[in-house]
Image (tube, helix red, strand yellow):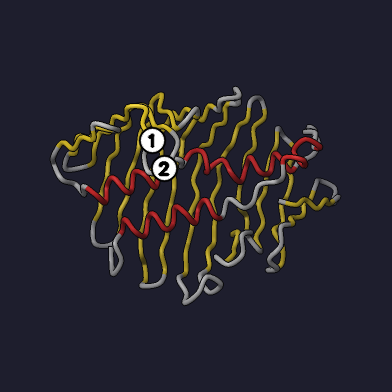
């Protein structure tokens, strides 16, 4: 990677991925909403936008481990938390139900493969019955990063993950997302564009998502300010319009036939 530590870039971009997960609706709003087969509710839209928050729970911690012991063929152990065996291409980490980096308890084994050259870097992590707190992760997640220019960074994430939540909800996410960052001199001037297509399943309901016009925003605003996302919910096709560039928490749903509905994120 050029000019900037790839580990620092990846961790920054991972935080942006969480940042662009938008804002959650209130618990009062959740209690008032009912899911219907012929509409898209606020809760369902939040599930689509925030699935990555669960599937990427370990990303920043993995980057910390890689940065601390970059490709060092050795065995590093922390008797209070974890044991890691490093190889030339990555590491195997075993966590003993411990608190790491002020996160929830981490428990289980994961395997990471890492690659870096002068132009790009990537890592793939495989989860099998891995727990962060009471959330169980299974599947794999690959993150590729490149820096085509001094102020332009591209992060591509490929996921095939199953997340089991403590209340019994099972979420799956499969597909790809690409986040392009244009670094500026301020939060407002640092902009992003998110594209991709993926599938999220929540129980018996499946949402197929395609971003037809990149979701764009800046780091000063906690919401995407423009872009179009197409959602198919069990055969029902709905457009989600994120606006005209104004920083607000509203999106417009466009249903078949032209009917529209405004939702708050």
Q: Quadrant of the N terminus?
A: bottom left
At 39% from the left and 32% from the top, the residue drawn is: 106
Residue corresponding to mark 1: 99
Depth check, front residue: 27 or 220: 27
Label 2 sits on residue: 102
| Neighbour tally class for label 1: few under 14, some 14-19, many 20 plus, Cα within 10 Å | some
Q: Which mark is residue 251?
A: none
Image point (28%, 45%), residue name: 65
Q: Is residue 9 left or right of residue 41?
A: left
> What residue sits 74% from the left and 55% below the top?
251
Residue 85's x, y, as percent? 19, 34
Q: Locate residue 108, reporting x and y percent.
A: 35, 26
Query: Considering the numbered disc 1 on the image, is that residue within a helix, a strand or a loop?
Result: strand
- Total labels: the figure holds 2
Label 1–label 2 contact, CB within 8 A: yes
| Nearer the observer, 142 or 101 | 101
What is the quadrant of residue 137 in the picture? top left
Relative height, residue 163 to residue 49 (above, below) = above
Residue 80 lies, in percent from the top left, at: 28, 32
The residue carrying pointer 2 sits among few (fewer than 14), some (14 to 19) or many (20 or more) residues within 10 Å by Cα, namely few
Q: Residue furthest front?
A: 80
């Amino acid at each position: 990677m050029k000019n900037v530590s790839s580990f620092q870039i990846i961790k920054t971009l991972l935080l942006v991925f969480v940042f662009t997960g938008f804002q959650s609706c209130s618990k009062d709003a959740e209690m008032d909403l009912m899911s219907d087969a012929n509409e898209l509710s606020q809760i369902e839209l939040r599930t689509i936008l925030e699935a990555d928050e669960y599937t990427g729970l370990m990303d920043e911690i993995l980057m910390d481990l890689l940065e601390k012991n970059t490709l060092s063929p050795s065995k590093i152990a922390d008797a209070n938390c974890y044991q890691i065996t490093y190889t030339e291409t990555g590491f195997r980490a075993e966590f003993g139900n411990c608190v790491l980096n002020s996160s929830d308890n981490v428990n289980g084994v994961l395997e990471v493969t890492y690659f870096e050259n002068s132009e790009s870097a990537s890592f793939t992590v495989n989860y099998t019955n891995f727990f962060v707190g009471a959330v169980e992760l299974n599947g794999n997640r690959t993150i590729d990063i490149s820096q085509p220019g001094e102020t332009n960074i591209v992060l591509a994430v490929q996921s095939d993950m199953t997340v089991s939540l403590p209340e019994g909800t099972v979420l799956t996410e499969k597909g790809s997302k690409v986040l392009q960052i244009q670094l500026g001199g301020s939060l407002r001037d640092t902009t992003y564009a998110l594209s991709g297509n993926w599938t999220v399943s929540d129980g018996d309901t499946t949402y197929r998502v395609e971003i037809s016009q990149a979701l764009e925003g800046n780091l000063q605003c906690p919401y995407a300010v423009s872009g179009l996302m197409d959602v198919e919910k069990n055969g029902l096709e709905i457009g989600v319009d994120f606006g005209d560039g104004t920083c607000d928490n509203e999106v417009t749903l466009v249903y078949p036939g032209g009917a529209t509905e405004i939702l708050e994120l």
